Amino acid sequence: MNMFAHKGRVRPVAAGFRGLAPALALGFGLLLLPGCDRDQVSRTVVTPEAPAAPAPLPAHGSMPAMPPGAMPPGAMPPAGAMPGGELPPPPRPRTALKWVAPKGWTETQGSGMRFATLTPPAGAGKAEVSVVVLPGPAGGELANVNRWRGQIGLPPLDEAALAAARKAVTAKAGTVAVYDFTSEGQVKSRMVTGLLASADGNTWFFKLMGDADPVGKAKPGFMHLLETLHLD
């Protein structure tokens, strides 16, 4: 037996390795396992995730993107605008215009921009009278007549042609300017309109519109309605 001398004492060398044998055996056993090598038994290193990149800032002087219809922060809606942004209908006049509807006609109260709706007796085709009242001159006579003509595909008129097309109806509420237009083409639409600037400062619009034949049949009753106009 090999001997090892240390400070006067003699110890067997084999006894010194005897305590290390189980640990060495376990280590070699791990290395000899199938599919296991030195790299696999090394410690796994966890790489931290990179932080998310911040959202790009808007260009200098530009506003951030906003949903359609949204108002910029701090912006004020236009005066008189409703929550949806649309303008409210004009207030109903304090002094309402009165008339006598022709026999057999039906009348319903309007809403929004329309003050009332009158319908002639049922027949072939369609015809309807709309009544609208606006404060002040409401754009003027020429502009409104040309707007009506555009609704049935007719070109605008000038001042001279407007005067030639105008017919006057006298009523207690004032003089009503009447116009009668028929569209061109195979399918004809007809429009008979009455415009009255009343003494209370409002402008009243009466429009009989529909297919050409029913409007022609309803025109006498419509003209009688205009003759009965009076302020309450």
Image: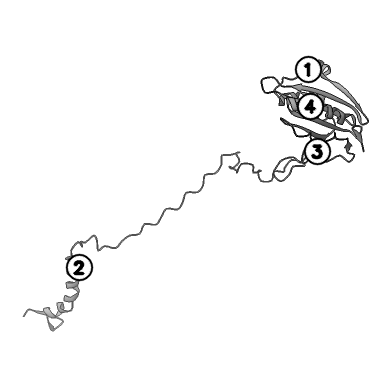
Q: Amino acid at mark 2?
A: Leu
Q: Amino acid at mark 4?
A: Lys
Q: Which residue is mark 3?
A: 106
Q: Amino acid at mark 3?
A: Thr
Of badges 1 and 4, the one in the foreground is: 4
Snapshot quadrant of residue 79 = top right
Nearer-N-terminus badge (1/2): 2
Nearer-N-terminus badge (2/3): 2
Q: CA distance from mark 3 to mark 4?
A: 16 Å
Of badges 3 and 1, the one in the foreground is: 3
Residue at image position (35%, 59%) is 46
Question: Would residue 111 appear left or right of 101 to someone viewing this image?
Answer: left
Snapshot quadrant of residue 121 = top right
Q: CA distance from mark 1 to mark 4?
A: 29 Å
Nearer-N-terminus badge (3/4): 3
Q: Which residue is mark 4?
A: 217
Pick out the residue farthest to the right: 172
Q: Which residue is mark 1?
A: 158
Picture layout, residue 174 above or below residue 56: above
Of badges 4 and 2, the one in the foreground is: 4
Nearer-N-terminus badge (4/2): 2
Q: Which residue is mark 2?
A: 30
| Residue 26, position as x, y percentages in the image | 19, 72
